Amino acid sequence: QVHLAESGGGLVVTGGSLTLSCAASGLTFSNYAMGWFRQASGKEREFVAKISANSLFPAYANSVSGRFTISRDSANNAVYLQMNSLKPTDTAVYYCAADTAEWGSVRHEDYEYWGQGTQVTISS
């Protein structure tokens, strides 16, 4: 059974940093691209970042490019999202997801497995 578990969310002030982690189990991690999505209250789920199955090709939404960094650790079956210069508009529930496509997708519909999410709140 595939299980994705996010951690690391919390409350920080504007300009602060957080690192989210996602631990994966029950799948061959190196076969999956991994993505981070977020959903703010009353809004649709949106793409944040993705990283290819071979770790070589990260990609970011324009809204987070230059502030967020996605990485993965195949030895520990984990994916991370380092978030810097946080803004109130980054407030959302953040989800990690796994995609069997090698490069991953910016569409949440393309991801096969999802975690339960972790809340990130940025105070102004």
Image: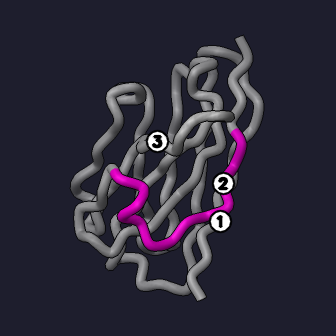
Q: Are discs 3 and 1 less than 8 Å apart at CB?
A: no
Q: Position of residue 29 (x, y in %)?
A: 42, 77
Could you tell me how far apart the alpha carbons at marks 3 and 2 are, in whole angstroms? Answer: 13 Å
> Residue, x 61% and y 64% (percent of image)?
115
Quadrant containing the N terminus is bottom right
**What is the crowding at mark 1: few (fewer than 14 residues within 10 Å), some, or many (at least 20)?**
some
Disc 1 designates what residue? Answer: 5
Quadrant containing the C terminus is top right
Q: Is 89 covered by the magenta stretch?
A: no
Q: Between disc 3 and disc 1, whose residue precedes?
A: 1
Q: Secondary structure at mark 1?
A: strand
Q: Nearer the viewer, residue 9 or 77?
A: 9
| Kind of residue at badge 2 | Gly
**What is the crowding at mark 2: few (fewer than 14 residues within 10 Å), some, or many (at least 20)?**
many
Q: Are discs 2 and 1 less than 8 Å apart at CB?
A: no
Residue 68 sits in quarter: top left
Q: Tell me the magenta residue range.
A: 107-119
